[in-house]
Amino acid sequence: MLLGLDTEGSEVITIYYGKNTKRSKAEEIVDRVRQQYPRLEVELICGGQPHYHYIASVE
């Protein structure tokens, strides 16, 4: 997930998980993202979106 992102100048990755996604599964994804991008803060938010399991933003 999120392979090849250009994160230069970025500070935060926010991952929003969907209505039909279990929080425990989303936390596993966040752990992997933190390993891939250790200098960035990674946040997890229940977005509740009905059609997408995950939406990510990089700021």
Image: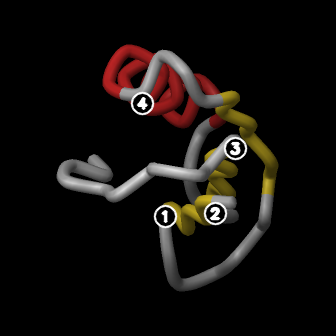
Which labelled disc corresponds to residue 39? none
Q: CA distance from mark 3 to mark 2?
A: 19 Å
Kind of residue indicated by mark 2: Gly
Q: CA distance from mark 2 to mark 1?
A: 5 Å
Which residue is farthest bottom?
Answer: 51
Classify mark 3: residues with Cα within 10 Å, few (<14), some (14-19) or many (20+): some
Which labelled disc corresponds to residue 18? 2
Classify mark 2: residues with Cα within 10 Å, few (<14), some (14-19) or many (20+): many
**Which percent across, then down, holds residue 6?**
34, 58
* Left/right of residue 7 with respect to residue 15 in the rendered view: left
Q: Is residue 50 above or below residue 31?
A: below
**Which percent across, then down, holds residue 22?**
59, 39
Q: Nearer the viewer, residue 11 or 9?
A: 9
What coloring was used for the rendering? secondary structure
Kind of residue indicated by mark 4: Val
Q: Which residue is mark 1?
A: 53
* Left/right of residue 37 with respect to residue 57 in the rendered view: left
> Which quadrant does the C terminus fall into?
bottom right
Which is more N-terminal, label 4 or label 3? 3
Q: Which residue is mark 4?
A: 33
**Which percent across, then down, holds residue 11?**
68, 42
Q: Which residue is mark 3?
A: 12
Which is more N-terminal, label 4 or label 1? 4
Q: Is residue 30 above or below residue 6?
A: above
Q: CA distance from mark 4 to mark 2?
A: 17 Å
